[in-house]
Amino acid sequence: MKEKSAAENRGLLLVFTGNGKGKTTAALGQAFRALGHGMRVAVIQFIKGSWKCGELEAAKRFSGQLDFHVMGRGFTWKSDDLNKDIAKAREAWQFTCDLLQQNRHQLVILDELTYLITYKMIGEEELLTGLARRPKEMHVVVTGRNASPGLIDAADLVTEMREIKHPYAWGIKAGKGIEF
Amino acid sequence: MKEKSAAENRGLLLVFTGNGKGKTTAALGQAFRALGHGMRVAVIQFIKGSWKCGELEAAKRFSGQLDFHVMGRGFTWKSDDLNKDIAKAREAWQFTCDLLQQNRHQLVILDELTYLITYKMIGEEELLTGLARRPKEMHVVVTGRNASPGLIDAADLVTEMREIKHPYAWGIKAGKGIEF
């Protein structure tokens, strides 16, 4: 029993990576589960639009428990000005570090964070340091393709979502309630 | 636009399989998203305890919209009497077919359904026929390890959740709000 309570006090780092569907959806499920336990949850979305109206509507049922921050509004990774993107990514990362330090949440979801490393917006070392400095009991979920080796190493649990079958024009076929 | 509305009318079959964490969690996220859109959702759980208190608590916020059925209470796949297990699995499958035909839900989640084929509780052919007979607009999510080739073939989208890193004694480490 002693072992269990000690373990419960340590926050975990979960990573959902890979090229398949289900990374953000699993993070959403994780949020839902934590909310059900009365935990406070923050979602930081690094890419515009990866969380859609369905979850935002559902989240309203948990007002006061769930904070939702969209960082990606400014950088869709299609900007003509790379320096502007980098500046916005660094701002987003600073916001994240501040939120972690504020310790107001038991679970923080960093959705599509891996892109910031992939596109060298922030360094892996810096990211790992920021995550390691989070409050001891805070759980963090990171999603995104191509999780870097250091991130995988630092994580407690890593699942790769592999695309086995993914129809052409999925977004159109899936539509309301499934894809968004 | 015409194409889109036609596509929206066709329900999809999504499969989350593989040995990694995140299959049920992604299905849960899918449910959450659909609920946010005001859709009616049913969850049928084929293995005892794969959905835990966190999501059941969260689900209460959507009462009237979400129906939750636990089929696995009777068969934990550890019974001494295989025939009893088979009978219960067949009952569960019949219940599922009836629920699909009732057409009261826009999304139905069949959690851990693949085990019924893996353990030859029901035939793949029978399962595919039951799924194919569902109302045209109904979306179905199937989760579980070792999705069979026929199921993968019938699905619109398949993601394999691969375990990259999964700590020993995960259940103990993860604890409330993360694992259950």
Image (cartoon, coloured by chain):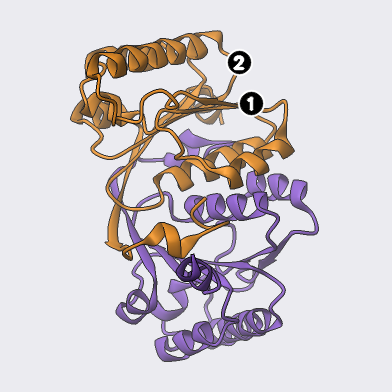
Chain colours: A purple, B orange
Q: Could you say which is closer to the camera, residue B160 or residue A114?
A: B160
Judged left or right of residue A44, residue B43 is: left
- The crowding category of the residue bearing disc 2, from other C-alpha atoms within 10 Å (few below 14, some 14 to 19, many at least 20), is some
- The secondary element bearing badge 2 is classed as loop
The spot of residue B14 in percent (x, y) is 40, 34
Q: Which residue is mark 1?
A: B40
Q: Are marks 2 and 1 in contact (CB under 8 Å)?
A: yes
**Above or below A132: residue A21:** above
Which chain is indicated by disc 1?
B
Q: Nearer the viewer, residue A108 or B46?
A: B46
Q: Chain of mark 2?
A: B
Question: What's the residue type where badge 2 is placed?
Answer: Arg
Residue with the mark numbered 2: B104
**Residue B119 vs residue A62: left or right?**
left
Name the residue rendered at 48%, 40% in the picture. B27
Residue drawn at (42%, 57%), measured in percent from left and top?
Answer: B171
At a point 46% along the width and 46% down the height, the residue shown is: B26
Q: Looking at this view, is B69 or A85 the one in front?
A: B69
Could you say which quadrant of the image residue B122 lies in? top left
Instruction: Give the CA separation, mark 2 to mark 1.
Output: 7 Å
Percent x, y of residue A19: 33, 57
What is the x, y in percent for residue A82?
A: 50, 84
Secondary structure of the residue carrying tag 1 is loop
Q: What residue appears at the point 68 percent right and 78 percent down from the top-left corner? A: A103
Is residue A69 something that shows in the picture? yes
The numbered mark at residue B157 is: none
